[in-house]
Image: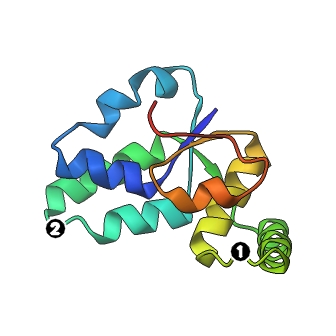
Amino acid sequence: MILVDSTVYIDWLRSRVDPSARLGDALRRNEAVTCGIIRAEVLRGIVSPPAKERMAMLFTLMQEVALDGDLWTDTAEMAWSLGRQGIVLPLTDIAIAACSRRVGATLITTDRHFGMIPGLRIRASI
């Protein structure tokens, strides 16, 4: 399983890389997951309506990690634990990390914040 962070999607889109082509194998194997936070972060920045629609359609092809009460409890616990260590990260990043942990996915990201979260499997590329 892989969960691609918004930073990677945004880099791909800026570089005119087709995200569906990059995710092709993972999509065919049903190993690509997403969450509402990532979807919202990516879609909010797309200017072109057709490009936004293509990206929104791509997200519908992935498994969605539910942002339910249990996930927010996990997020709060992770934020609290990190805070006791003096690590204060954006709440969205902590929630994305909780999503990744929930499904056992490797997080694909270029955001250095995620490297501060113990036990999180991360890579910079697919």
Q: Give the residue at mark 1.
A: 87
Q: Give the residue at mark 2.
A: 47
User: Is label 1 in a helix, a strand or a loop?
Assistant: loop
User: Is label 2 in a helix, a strand or a loop?
Assistant: loop
Q: Quadrant of residue 74?
A: bottom right
Query: Camera-side residue: 22 or 48?
Result: 22
Q: Image point 73% across, 59% down: which residue?
A: 98
Q: CA distance from mark 2 to mark 1?
A: 34 Å
Q: How many marks?
A: 2
Horizontal relation, residue 67 to residue 13: left or right: right
- Circle 1 crowding by C-alpha within 10 Å: few under 14, some 14–19, many from 20: few
Q: Earlier in the sequence, mark 2 or mark 1?
A: 2
- Residue 120 position in % (x across, y down): 72, 47
Q: Is residue 27 above or below residue 51?
A: above
Q: Image point 44% across, 34% down: which residue?
A: 125
Q: Which three-letter amino acid code belongs to the residue tagged 2?
A: Val
Q: Image point 68% across, 49% down: which residue?
A: 100
- Residue 102 position in % (x across, y down): 78, 50
Q: Is residue 110 above or below residue 70?
A: above
